[in-house]
């Protein structure tokens, strides 16, 4: 399944090897370490992902 997903990183990511995650949107949200592409993935529901993103965004 992972090879069929369209993975993306934050536009703030670079190729310097810093800690970064990749996300793929499907019926679930798939999350993985960008440095370990064949490693484990975390799958969460879309509402759980939205709640996470809202919680970590800085307040305006």
Image (cartoon, rainbow, N blue to C red):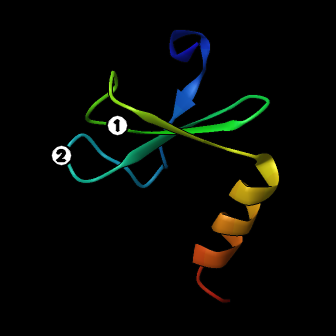
Q: In this view, does 33 lie to the left or right of 58?
A: left
Give the answer, above or below, for where 19 lies relative to 15.
Answer: below
Number of the label disc, if any, that sits on residue 34: 1
**Residue 48 location, x and y as percent?**
73, 58
User: For the point 60% across and 10% down, which residue is it?
Assistant: 4
**Distance between the Cα atoms at labels 1 and 2?**
12 Å
Give the answer, above or below, for where 7 lies relative to 44.
Answer: above
Give the answer, above or below, for where 46 lies relative to 32.
Answer: below
Considering every residue shown, the one lying at the far bottom of the view is 60
Q: In what quadrant of the picture does the C terminus appear? A: bottom right
Rendering quarter of residue 36: top left
Query: Disc count in the image?
Result: 2
**Residue 3 location, x and y as percent?**
51, 10
SS class, disc 1: loop
SS class, disc 2: loop
User: For the point 79% across and 30% down, which residue is it?
Assistant: 27
Number of the label disc, if any, that sits on residue 12: none
**Residue 49 location, x and y as percent?**
69, 55
**Residue 23 location, x and y as percent?**
55, 39
Rendering quarter of residue 55: bottom right
User: For the point 78% across and 48% down, which residue is it?
Assistant: 46
Mark found first going from the N terminus, 1 or 2: 2
Which of the two residues, 51 or 10, is positioned nearer the viewer here? 51
Q: In what quadrant of the picture does the N terminus appear? A: top right
**Answer yes or no: do the residues labelled 1 and 2 have beta carbons within 8 Å?**
no
Mark 1 against mark 2, which lies toward the viewer?
1
Crowd class of label 2 (few under 14; some 14 to 19; many from 20; radius 10 Å): few
Number of the label disc, if any, that sits on residue 16: 2
User: For the point 47% across and 34% down, which residue is it?
Assistant: 41
Give the answer, above or below, for where 21 lies relative to 26.
Answer: below
Q: Is residue 24 left or right of residue 37?
A: right
Crowd class of label 1 (few under 14; some 14 to 19; many from 20; radius 10 Å): some
């Amino acid at each position: 399944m992972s090879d069929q997903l369209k993975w993306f990183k934050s536009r703030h990511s670079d190729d310097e090897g810093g800690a970064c995650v990749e996300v793929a949107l499907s019926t679930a949200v798939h999350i993985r370490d960008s440095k370990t592409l064949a490693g484990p993935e975390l799958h969460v529901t879309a509402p759980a992902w939205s709640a996470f993103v809202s919680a970590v965004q800085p307040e305006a």
